[in-house]
Image: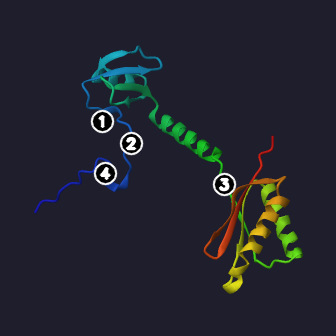
Amino acid sequence: MALRRRSNKNYSPRGQKEDPHRINKNIKEPKLRLVGDNVEMGVYPTKDCLKKAEELNLDLVVISPKADPPVAKIMDYKKFLYEQKKREKSMKAKASKVVVKEIRFGPNTDDHDYEFKKKNAEKFLKEGAKLKAFVFFKGRSIVFKDKGQILLLRLAQDLEDLGKVEQMPKLEGKRMIMLITPKKDK
């Protein structure tokens, strides 16, 4: 019984990843449109393109395989990959991450506890984090839904100068939740 080789295009022995571009000897097309630095642009046979790349000690890389004829560029492939990874990493670092901080109240939270939690909420909004304030109803305390709503609306009014309400108080199961986002400084 003969072993069958995997037909997966991305498979390579020893778990090495294959290059996302076709380079040098992996190019099968008979003709290529050649572009790049220090190169006269035009359509050439693949053999000639490979010779030019060898003369310049660079790689021949197919950058647009679906074009007719496919477009190839003479460049330093490892340097190209390095700069591409670097660009992706910087884009990822610039993407903003939303932090959500939670504050939990009970329906019968007294004034001292409310003030303490309000100070924390102010700190969170000043840091630029979203605030998820919720009232948790245990057992029969669910009958005090109106107290919970009043508490959350009071918090929204007290934090009006630091943030704006994204979601008004809404009952979800045993929790009444309200979301506040920080205001952008102009």
Crowd band around label 4 with a 10 angstrom C-alpha radius: few (<14), some (14–19), many (20+): few
Instruction: State how far apart marks 4 and 2 are (Cα).
Output: 11 Å
C-beta proximity under 8 Å, tags 3 and 4? no
Secondary structure under tag 2 reads: loop
Task: Inspect the image, locate mark 1, and give the three-letter code of the amino acid beneath it.
Answer: Asn
Give the quarter of the image for residue 186: top right
Give the quarter of the image for residue 72: top left
Residue 137, image x, y percentages: 69, 79
Task: Inspect the image, locate mark 3, and give the three-letter code of the amino acid beneath it.
Answer: Val
Looking at the image, tell me whether mark 3 or mark 4 is earlier in sequence order: 4
Res. 68 mark: none
Q: Is residue 1 left or right of residue 171?
A: left
The image's colouring method is rainbow
Task: Inspect the image, locate mark 4, and give the three-letter code of the amino acid beneath it.
Answer: Tyr
Secondary structure under tag 3 reads: loop
Instruction: State how far apart marks 2 and 3 are (Cα).
Output: 34 Å
State the residue in front, 77 or 160: 160
Task: Inspect the image, locate mark 2, and give the three-letter code of the amino acid beneath it.
Answer: Asp
Looking at the image, tell me whether mark 2 or mark 3 is earlier in sequence order: 2
Looking at the image, tell me whether mark 4 or mark 2 is earlier in sequence order: 4
Crowd band around label 1 with a 10 angstrom C-alpha radius: few (<14), some (14–19), many (20+): few
Badge 1 is on which residue?
A: 26
Residue at image position (12%, 59%) is 2
Instruction: State how far apart marks 1 and 3 are (Cα).
Output: 44 Å
C-beta proximity under 8 Å, tags 2 and 1? yes
Badge 3 is on which residue?
A: 98
Res. 19 mark: 2
Front disc: 1 or 3: 3
Secondary structure under tag 4 reads: loop
Residue at image position (84%, 66%) is 118
Instruction: State how far apart marks 1 and 4 are (Cα).
Output: 15 Å
Residue at image position (40%, 15%) is 41
